Image (cartoon, rainbow, N blue to C red):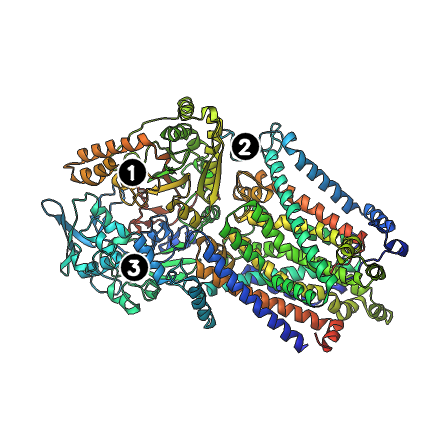
């Protein structure tokens, strides 16, 4: 098991390294520099600016400088917001996106697991078809379609819920969280249904039932653990997807989170911001993937046995 | 429904989780809108467009930054909100010498920084040094170029600031020497890049020309305007409170302002409708007819000193031929554009300078004339569009720009039978293309920095940084740079401008499209937000009247 | 993961491409019994046919504007209404569908070719080559692709070709993994051993015996990749990074519609319906295929 963790950790390092390098060169390759502006940038002014941000150094030197800063945890100053460091901006947006993602994930888990388990318990009946069709809608409706529709219905026609902001008006967190979580609720519903179906057909479940255990105990104590493995394994990629989804949801609902900062930084050619956010987010994603893989492996008795024998 | 989830299947922790989730999501609050609360407390809630880059007057550019800096700082002179004539600001009066090349500003001895220090003339000398220093990277440094030797200093040709024409004769007397008489110079003193900053505060955090420093943070920043900075939550809000040391504080009615970064016009309008904002930065075009139809509408539309036009790269085929350029320009039905796509928010433009700029009226050399356009195109070698090599129009990503580009593309197809591609580029790429002149036709807008035709006409001097068209004519340069400044009166000056502009438009290096208008939504409880040609707002004149609400139809 | 092996052993020998007809035949019967999948298939075919015939059957010219008309709700002349330029919405949706479906199919095809080839080689050859190839896949898999695609599109500009490549580059990884594990398990089969002993070249074996047998999961996965590709394109277009005007796609139409949904809700609803229904069909079809071919996927 430990070997498994170690191997995966070791694997993660080249990944992050590639991310940093690729992003660095990609961003620098882009046309348009961070200091272009509508009023003409006089050449002498531009030169002064570039000197200050070390953009006049040869590329490989900039790269090395960046790497050494990174090692100290310093993501550099933002080009777009002079006076603010990337760390600062990241950490101002992080709690917001984290909160949004958390709610979305919780909604997704709660609704998804409930729906999936319910469907698996009575396959091919209405208890199965209805949640699964709703799940399909969740998967097929992109967040930038669902979001505006929810806004239209609940915010504008019914006027039940606020339609922008985060934490400014009570209840303004509901629509964004649902919009972001909906697709994942759908995936989780399908996954948990499939997982539960597989587990419920196993011998040990039949044994438990034969022993006379009440159904709900059978489900919660025996089936759930194995049945939810695919869900746990999914959490890693779900996390990455949630972050991507946050770009859209934060834009639609005007939420001051990382996703929006990232998209803006990309458009503004705010080199350090793009780099910093990419490195940060990628590291998070890699870690999350690692965590979810490990948890899934740990929960799966068969895989655990495999690992005892070395990866 | 026959089959229902049996309750004894329900996992027991689910309801608990749901309850926690719901309470977290709904949060708590008073339920009173910002506007109602604000009216009671004298706090203005202001939709400000984008999150600002920063608050340093010598570093940042942009309209949102402009609003914030002007609330925090004040210049030597301010503008009257209605007439835009210069009025005393930090300087209580100023005098000119005989040939109007030396201006002496007499600072108000009561003018103070927010920490109580007096605002002195040497603060200005220090600040203009900073504003002009090449290392500071002030993109608006050129605003001070009328000052003697300022341009040479900014370009690094001289490096002793003592040679630049600004001197502190004593604490309250500032003497400014100009290269030549500049009628609009006092107006420039109201532009934030000429504002003074507090030298001691800046020096606490680094060198004069450092751009990174935290001097603009809450708690550090020292400013001399009607308001002081009290809170800045990135991407959420910027809060200001009344400045107790401001020399004119008696006349400031507001107790504070909260600025919101409202990038999305559609969301901003919704915030306004639920009374979370007193004033919006923009109004989505599609909402305009709705607002116009209401009695006592909060919709405010006013002329704005700016022109929206298409730049033409006169060195590229097929637009290097003046007949082609004229044909393209005459085939655009500006009236229809203004009426339909732009919801009558704008006025068609046929020249670069907006009409009635300080009383100046630009020449109009042509009109929408598809037949003549076709003739010209045929003369140029593309009868009925035959042999047309194609043309690309670039514009920066924006809903309105797209709409216009799509409409114009279609007009050219319909009236001239030519195929034109349009390509939206995001901001930085677009700017790069324009400055590198890597385009055939590019959308552009120019908003005046000060109210004077010179601001528009000097765009097209040979190799001007904002020219981007390749138009170069020595006679034009001479008229704008030499003759006009030496005119003895306004009438003469304007005549020179008129002739120059006629010469310019005969070559059609641009396709003027429309003159801007600003559009805002302003809550009925707000008074003192007088519209003016520069959309220049001075919050010290704003007053809030409690008890007023939005018209019924909007609620 | 497992796949039903051809029950009829005799056919799984060195004969040519003709596979166990009973496998496909069985699958077909099972599929046709699945109502959702069948309706999905029909709707999909309808969409594709309409998309192909669009230049001939669209009611209006796609580019002609009628500025004075502006945005109008559905009426007899314009069944789905018009957009702010006075252009017929039904026509816009039809042309948008062409692009959206094209992106979907082409990008998936790109992903398919790369993924299948990669996975087949890795799975067949095994050993060091396999380890290296799959390690690469693992590393690439961990990259946060959404972030990179945004960056790629911002950096290199919006060019439809690049879009196909970028999207295809994201999706091939899972395809490769599936193919590899298919190939690995098939490799052990006797008929492959027999083929080797007969001296057939690896390429021929892969082509004639391995790939056809692995088709099941490939088909399923492909059918399920198309909707995810279409969603990706819509997502990028929404951010302004995908398809550019004057071309249109469902994603673009939806993003424009969302902006004016209060005044002109039909501009959001109809393109939204078009996209959702198509994705629905593809997903149901894919699910049906998966059930029919009795494929149990490891990744959903």
- Provide residue C221's location: percent of width, then percent of height: 72, 53
Q: Are marks 1 and 3 on the same chain?
A: yes
- The reply, left or right, for residue B498 in relation to residue A246 is left
- The reply, left or right, for residue C5 in relation to residue C275 is right
Label 1 or label 3, whichever lies nearer to me, is 1
- Provide residue B250's location: percent of width, then percent of height: 24, 55
Question: Label 3 belongs to which residue?
Answer: B136
Query: Which is nearer the eye, B511 or B205?
Result: B511
Query: Which is nearer the eye, B457 or B201?
Result: B457
Q: Place residue C76 in its image quadrant.
A: top right
**Disc 1 to disc 3, how far (Cα)?**
31 Å
Say what secondary structure mark 3 lies in: helix
Q: Are marks 2 and 3 on the same chain?
A: no
Question: Label 1 belongs to which residue?
Answer: B472
Say what secondary structure mark 2 lies in: loop
Category of crowding for the residue at label 1, using alpha-carbon neighbours closer than 10 angstroms: few (below 14), some (14–19), many (at least 20) = some
- Provide residue B248's location: percent of width, then percent of height: 23, 55
**Disc 2 to disc 3, how far (Cα)?**
49 Å
Q: Mark 1 — on which chain does it sit?
A: B
Label annotation for residue C63: 2
Q: Place residue A79 in its image quadrant.
A: bottom left
Say what secondary structure mark 1 lies in: loop
Q: Confirm or deny contact between disc 2 and disc 1 (CB under 8 A).
A: no
Image height check: is A207 above or below A154? below
């Amino acid at each position: 098991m430990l070997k498994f963790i170690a191997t995966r950790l070791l694997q993660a390092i080249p990944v992050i390294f590639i991310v940093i390098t690729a992003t660095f060169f990609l961003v620098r390759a882009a046309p348009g520099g961070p200091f272009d502006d509508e009023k003409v940038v006089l050449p002498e002014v531009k030169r002064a600016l570039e000197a200050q941000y070390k953009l006049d150094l040869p590329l490989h030197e900039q790269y090395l400088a960046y790497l050494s800063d990174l090692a100290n945890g310093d993501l550099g100053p933002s080009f777009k917001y002079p006076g603010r460091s990337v760390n600062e901006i990241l950490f101002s947006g992080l709690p917001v996106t984290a909160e949004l993602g958390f709610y979305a994930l919780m909604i997704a888990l709660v609704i998804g697991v409930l729906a999936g388990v319910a469907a698996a318990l009575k396959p091919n009946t209405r208890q199965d078809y209805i949640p699964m069709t709703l799940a399909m809608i969740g998967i097929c409706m992109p967040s930038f379609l669902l979001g505006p529709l929810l806004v239209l219905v609940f915010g504008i026609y019914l006027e039940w819920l606020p339609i922008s902001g985060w934490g400014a008006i009570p209840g303004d967190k509901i629509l964004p969280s649902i919009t972001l979580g909906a697709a994942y609720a759908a995936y989780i519903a399908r996954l948990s249904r499939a997982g539960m179906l597989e587990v419920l057909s196993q011998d040990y479940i039949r044994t438990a039932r034969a022993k006379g255990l009440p159904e709900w105990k059978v489900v919660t104590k025996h089936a759930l653990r194995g049945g939810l493995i695919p869900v746990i394994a999914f959490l890693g990629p779900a996390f990455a997807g949630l972050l991507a989804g946050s770009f859209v949801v934060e834009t639609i609902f005007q939420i001051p989170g990382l996703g929006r900062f990232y998209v803006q930084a990309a458009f503004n050619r705010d080199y350090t911001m793009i780099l910093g956010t990419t490195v940060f987010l990628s590291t998070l994603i890699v870690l999350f993937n690692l965590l979810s893989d490990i948890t899934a492996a740990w929960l799966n008795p068969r895989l655990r046995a495999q690992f005892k024998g070395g990866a | 429904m026959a089959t229902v989830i049996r309750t004894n299947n329900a996992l027991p922790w689910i309801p608990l989780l749901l309850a926690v989730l719901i309470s977290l999501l709904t949060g708590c609050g008073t339920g009173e809108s910002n506007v109602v609360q604000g009216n009671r407390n004298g706090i203005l809630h202001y939709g400000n467009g984008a999150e600002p880059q920063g608050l340093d007057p010598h570093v940042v550019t942009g309209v949102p930054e402009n609003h914030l800096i002007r609330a925090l700082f004040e210049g030597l002179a301010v503008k009257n909100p209605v007439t835009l004539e210069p009025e005393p600001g930090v300087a209580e009066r100023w005098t000119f010498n005989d040939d109007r090349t030396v201006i002496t500003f007499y600072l108000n001895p009561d003018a103070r920084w927010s920490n109580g220090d007096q605002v002195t003339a040497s603060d200005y000398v220090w600040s203009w040094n900073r504003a002009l220093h090449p290392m500071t990277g002030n993109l608006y440094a050129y605003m001070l170029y009328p000052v003697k030797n300022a341009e040479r200093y900014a370009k690094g040709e001289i490096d002793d600031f003592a040679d630049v024409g600004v001197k502190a004769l004593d604490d309250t007397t500032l003497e400014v020497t100009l290269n030549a008489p500049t009628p609009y110079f006092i107006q420039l003193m109201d532009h934030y890049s000429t504002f003074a900053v507090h030298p001691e505060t800046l020096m606490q955090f680094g060198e004069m020309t450092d751009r990174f420093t935290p001097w603009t943070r809450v708690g550090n920043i020292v400013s001399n305007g009607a308001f002081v900075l009290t809170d800045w939550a990135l991407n959420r809000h910027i809060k200001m409170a009344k400045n107790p040391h401001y020399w004119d504080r008696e006349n400031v009615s507001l107790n504070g302002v909260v600025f919101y970064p409202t990038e999305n016009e559609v969301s901003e309008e919704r915030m306004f409708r639920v009374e979370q904002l007193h004033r919006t930065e923009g109004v989505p075009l599609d909402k305009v007819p709705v607002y116009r139809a209401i009695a006592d509408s909060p919709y405010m539309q006013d002329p704005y000193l700016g022109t929206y036009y298409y730049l033409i790269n006169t060195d590229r085929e097929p637009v290097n031929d003046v007949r082609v350029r004229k044909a393209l320009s005459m085939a655009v039905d500006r009236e229809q554009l203004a009426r339909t796509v732009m919801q009558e928010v704008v006025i068609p433009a046929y020249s670069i300078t907006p009409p009635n700029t300080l009383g100046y009226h630009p020449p109009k050399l042509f009109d929408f004339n598809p037949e003549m356009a076709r003739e010209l195109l045929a003369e140029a070698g593309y009868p009925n569009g035959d042999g047309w090599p194609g043309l690309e129009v670039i514009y920066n990503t924006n809903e309105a720009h797209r709409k216009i580009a799509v409409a114009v593309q279609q007009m050219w197809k319909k009236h001239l039978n030519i195929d034109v591609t349009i390509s939206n580029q995001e901001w930085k790429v677009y700017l790069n293309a324009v400055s590198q002149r890597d385009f055939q036709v590019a959308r552009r807008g120019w908003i005046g920095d000060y109210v004077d035709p010179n601001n528009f006409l000097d765009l097209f001097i040979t190799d001007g940084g904002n020219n981007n068209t390749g138009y170069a004519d020595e006679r034009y340069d001479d008229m704008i740079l030499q003759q006009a400044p030496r005119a003895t009166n306004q009438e003469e000056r304007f005549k020179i401008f008129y002739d120059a502009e006629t010469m310019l438009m005969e070559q059609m290096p641009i396709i003027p499209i429309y003159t801007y208008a600003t559009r805002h939504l302003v809550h009925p409880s707000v008074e003192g937000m007088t519209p003016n040609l520069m959309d220049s707002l001075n919050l010290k004149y704003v007053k809030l009247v409690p008890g007023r609400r939005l018209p019924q139809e909007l609620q | 993961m497992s796949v039903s092996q051809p029950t009829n052993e005799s056919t799984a020998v060195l004969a040519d491409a003709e596979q166990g007809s009973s496998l496909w035949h069985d699958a077909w019967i099972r599929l046709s019994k699945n109502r959702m999948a069948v309706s999905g298939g029909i709707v999909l075919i309808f969409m594709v046919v309409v998309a192909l015939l669009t230049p001939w059957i669209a009611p209006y010219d796609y580019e002609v504007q009628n500025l004075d008309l502006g945005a109008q709700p559905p009426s007899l002349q314009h069944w789905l209404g018009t957009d702010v330029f006075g252009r017929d919405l039904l026509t816009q949706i039809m042309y948008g569908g062409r692009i959206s479906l094209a992106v979907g199919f082409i990008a998936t095809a790109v992903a398919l070719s790369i993924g299948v080839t990669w996975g087949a080689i890795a799975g067949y050859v095994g050993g060091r080559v396999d380890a290296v190839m799959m390690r690469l896949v693992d590393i690439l898999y961990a990259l946060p692709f959404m972030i990179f695609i945004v960056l790629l599109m911002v950096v290199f500009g919006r060019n439809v070709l690049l879009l196909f490549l970028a999207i295809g580059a994201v999706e091939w990884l899972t395809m490769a993994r599936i193919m590899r594990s298919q190939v690995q398990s098939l490799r052990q089969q006797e008929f492959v051993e027999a083929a080797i002993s007969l001296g057939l070249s690896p390429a021929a074996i892969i082509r004639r015996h391995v790939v056809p047998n692995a088709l099941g999961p490939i088909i399923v996965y492909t059918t399920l990749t198309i909707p995810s590709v279409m969603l990706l394109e819509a997502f990028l277009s929404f951010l302004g990074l995908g398809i550019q005007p004057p071309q249109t796609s469902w994603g673009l139409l939806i993003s424009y519609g969302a902006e004016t949904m209060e005044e002109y809700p039909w501009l959001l609803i109809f393109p939204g319906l078009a996209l959702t229904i198509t994705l629905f069909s593809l997903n149901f079809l894919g699910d049906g295929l998966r059930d029919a071919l009795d494929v149990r996927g490891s990744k959903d």
